Image (spheres, rainbow, N blue to C red):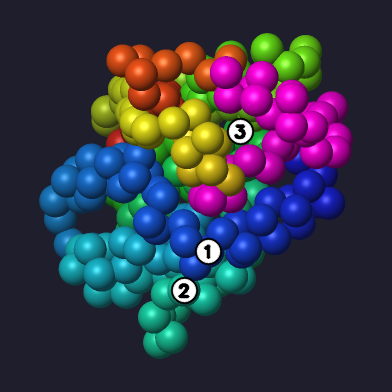
């Protein structure tokens, strides 16, 4: 992802910041799974890709000091004013070696430009014995969106997310111990295809990381064709996310 695309991603998420939480239902499902895994209180915990800091209270109960880091200043601005916040790129973490006891990252790491480097960075900033609790959108997500677009053109309109096996390899290559890992399909159901598309836009996730996306607005006829091409289940539109859930330890 180029610097310009990352700037676009930050801007899009900033614009979505005020309505993000009310649309981030699948993200909340994943967060609840991760939070249950954090069974011991630690000193310093990093919320990596904190977004609008909707997990601030839950994470604060699990540590003495919570640090929230996100690429979007608009997202961080939704959190408590007195919280410790860092607006930065996760691919260039401005943190010292061995400085955090635990890392929580929910639906964020898929935006990394270099997963191998990022996992190495996670190991670097963790103290020995430190833990990372991650949920990462993986390959195969948003297949319904892609199927709908195929009725309109041949372009790819869904981000090319990293396969689950590749994420495991990056963690292992970084020297992190994989305590637990699974690929889970989390779904959200909408009354119409239009509502499903609006949900993706509302959380800022309609920014593609790759080149070659369609430019310009759809005409009315094409938009109707797009909605008609959306696969329905019992008359309702679903959005499917393939989510890698990982618990890692630095020895």
Which of the numbered marks, if any, corresponds to residue 116? 3
Q: Is residue 161 magenta?
A: no
Q: SS of the residue at dot 1?
A: loop
Q: Which residue is mark 2?
A: 78
C-alpha separation, residue under disc 1 versus residue under disc 2: 7 Å
Q: x, y percentage for residue 57?
A: 25, 69
Taking the spot 76% from the left edge, 56% from the top edge, the residue there is 7
Q: Is residue 238 above or below residue 24?
A: above
Disc 1 crowd, CA 10 A, few/some/many (<14, 14-19, 20+): many
Are the residues tagged 1 and 2 within 8 Å (C-beta)? yes
What residue would you read off at disc 1? Answer: 17
The quadrant in which the N terminus is found is: top right
Across and down, in percent, residue 215 comes to 85, 35
Task: Residue 172: tell me if it is visible.
Answer: no
Please state, as top left, top right, bottom left or bottom right, where the C terminus lies in the image: top left
100 or 80: nearer the viewer: 80
Q: Which region shows up in magenta?
A: 202-228
Mark 2–mark 3 CB contact (< 8 Å): no
Q: Residue at coordinates 53% horizontally, 51% vertically from top-left?
A: 202
For the residue labelled by badge 3, is the local secondary structure a helix, a strand or a loop?
A: helix
């Amino acid at each position: 992802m180029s610097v310009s695309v990352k700037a676009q991603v930050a801007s899009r998420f900033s614009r979505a910041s005020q309505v993000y939480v009310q649309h981030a239902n699948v993200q909340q499902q994943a967060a609840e799974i991760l939070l249950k895994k954090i069974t011991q209180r630690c000193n310093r915990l990093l919320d990596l890709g904190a977004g609008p800091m909707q997990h601030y209270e839950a994470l604060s109960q699990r540590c003495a000091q919570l640090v929230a880091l996100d690429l979007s200043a608009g997202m961080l601005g939704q959190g408590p004013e007195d919280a410790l916040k860092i607006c930065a790129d996760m691919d260039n973490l401005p943190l010292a070696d061995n400085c955090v006891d635990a890392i929580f990252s929910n639906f964020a790491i898929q935006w990394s430009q270099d997963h191998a480097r990022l996992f190495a960075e996670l190991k670097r900033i963790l103290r020995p014995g430190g833990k990372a609790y991650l949920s990462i959108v993986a390959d195969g997500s948003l297949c319904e969106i892609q199927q709908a677009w195929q009725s309109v053109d041949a372009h790819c309109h869904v981000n090319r997310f990293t396969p689950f096996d590749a994420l495991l390899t990056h963690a292992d290559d970084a020297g992190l111990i994989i305590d637990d890992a699974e690929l889970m399909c989390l779904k959200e159901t909408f009354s119409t295809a239009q509502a499903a598309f609006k949900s993706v836009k509302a959380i800022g996730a309609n920014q593609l990381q790759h080149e070659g996306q369609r430019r310009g607005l759809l005409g009315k006829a094409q938009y109707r064709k797009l909605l008609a091409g959306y696969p329905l289940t019992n008359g309702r539109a679903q959005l499917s996310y393939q989510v890698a859930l990982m618990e890692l330890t630095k020895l």
